[in-house]
Amino acid sequence: MNLGISATEFVSQAKEGAISVEEFIAKTLERIKQVEDKVHAFITVDSQNALAKAKDIDKKIRSKEKIGSCFGMPVSIKDNICAAGLKTTCASKMLENFVAPYDATVISRLKNEDAIIIGKVNLDEFAMGSTTEFSYFGTSRNPWNPQYVPGGSSGGSGVSVSALECVASLGSDTGGSVRSPASFCSVVGLKPTYGLISRYGLVSYANSIEQIGPMARTVEDVAFLLNIISGHDSHDNTTINNPQVDYLKDLKSGISGKKIGIISQMIGEGIDKEVASATNMAISKLQDLGAECIPISLDAVEHSVAAYYTIASAEASSNLSRYDNLRYGFNFGTEGYEFKAYVAKARSNFGPEVTRRMLLGAYVLSAGYYGKYYLKAQKVRAMIKAQLDEAFKKVDFLISPTMPILPFKIGEKIDDPLKLYLTDINTVTANLSGIPAISVPFAISSSGLPIGIQLFANSFEENKLLQAAYVLQETTDLPEVPL
């Protein structure tokens, strides 16, 4: 049985009875046992419920009952998205025993379509990080070379899809957290337009810039998932009440006659030579297929990382202040109880990166520095959006490398936060502006590590973005993961 089939292939075969859902889930669970020691993608594996659900779906298929569009495909979920009855830890000691009492909207929608939640996957604590090294439960490893980082913060999602431990996954993207592991693990990852997918049930980090996004092995699979999880939600008043779009429709319509802007600031200084070469190759292939590629300058990109970390840390500081250990958490006893000391003791359970960002956020929001840092960051954000609006008057899409560098060794950058933050230079622009962006696997470096290419479109133009991504995907012939 081929565990590497795409989501759409799985649905087609399950519908025809060519594969048993129960057998596929059993083989997937075997695969997880086989490779987890090497890659550590999962925090929780829900074996019992997954097999029970698979048996039920097989019965429905045999008796020709109505079945949801997922037909029992195994999906992994980033462990900052609530799924009723399963732990939602955010990879933090603070929440190590928290069991979600309800389903996030995206989980409800997947379950309604008979997807099987195979388990919850690893991340940087509270989604703060770019490598999945900042997890209380240990580092996830890149399936292409376990000595290297898989990207982050949705590292477990990228690893589980790449290592054939599930058919698809949901991650969250605050500054590149879906696209970074997609690029480093050679899978497809979409950061949707802000407001397209409900955030209800996503544990808050930075509300104004984070979005849940699908990850899968093909662009078609991402479009399939987007059809299920997108749309207005009364639980989340930031979702847009737009007419429902079928993202699979016209997916193969091509790119002839379209204009693509090459973002100068994302392909110049500081870009790894092999990454730059792959990007130029991608541009050349798109031109061969009828697209016109022209240079575009976005000056504000140079300030994007500073603006992003100022805004995200400010929102994180506010959001994480709710963790005071009063409603749930650890039993510290009441001896010598004093409120500030008690809360300080509770918050000592946060890891180093979360602590760093909370302190930074509190600082930039403080009375003496609000105007100097936070307000200035919001002005940069507005400037980025204005420059993108102008760019999209001239072009249909923008292109860049997803990550400026190749995957690096575990531990190589963990002691230098600034170097780690700068790896987000190409991804944070989409979050600050709210536009959609997708990472498509494009090449494998001479050292055997994946390289992803990023495409951007204007707000709520995911259908066009997926069409362009599909064209790019079809120009590649990549090897299977060596794990």
Image (spheres, rainbow, N blue to C red):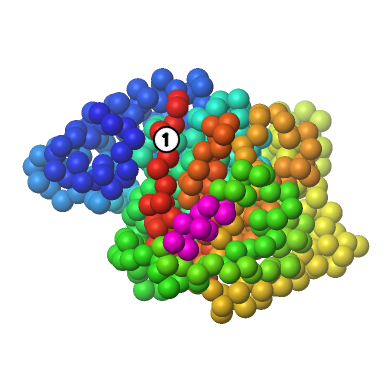
The stretch in magenta equals: 279-288
Q: Position of residue 22 (x, y in %)?
A: 23, 31
Q: Residue at x 26, y 44 (%)?
A: 9
Helix, strand or loop under label 1: loop
Q: Residue at x 70, y 60 (%)?
A: 265
Q: Residue at x 30, y 51 (%)?
A: 112
Quarter of the image with the C terminus is top left
The residue furthest right is 368
Q: Amino acid at mark 1?
A: Pro
**The image quarter in which residue 224 lies:** bottom left
* In the foreground, 207 or 301: 301
Q: Residue at x 45, y 27 (%)?
A: 482
**The image quarter in which residue 372 lies:** bottom right
Q: Position of residue 287 (x, y in %)?
A: 47, 63
The residue under label 1 is 479
The residue furthest left is 63
Q: Is residue 25 left or right of residue 19?
A: right
Is residue 471 shown above or below 298?
A: above
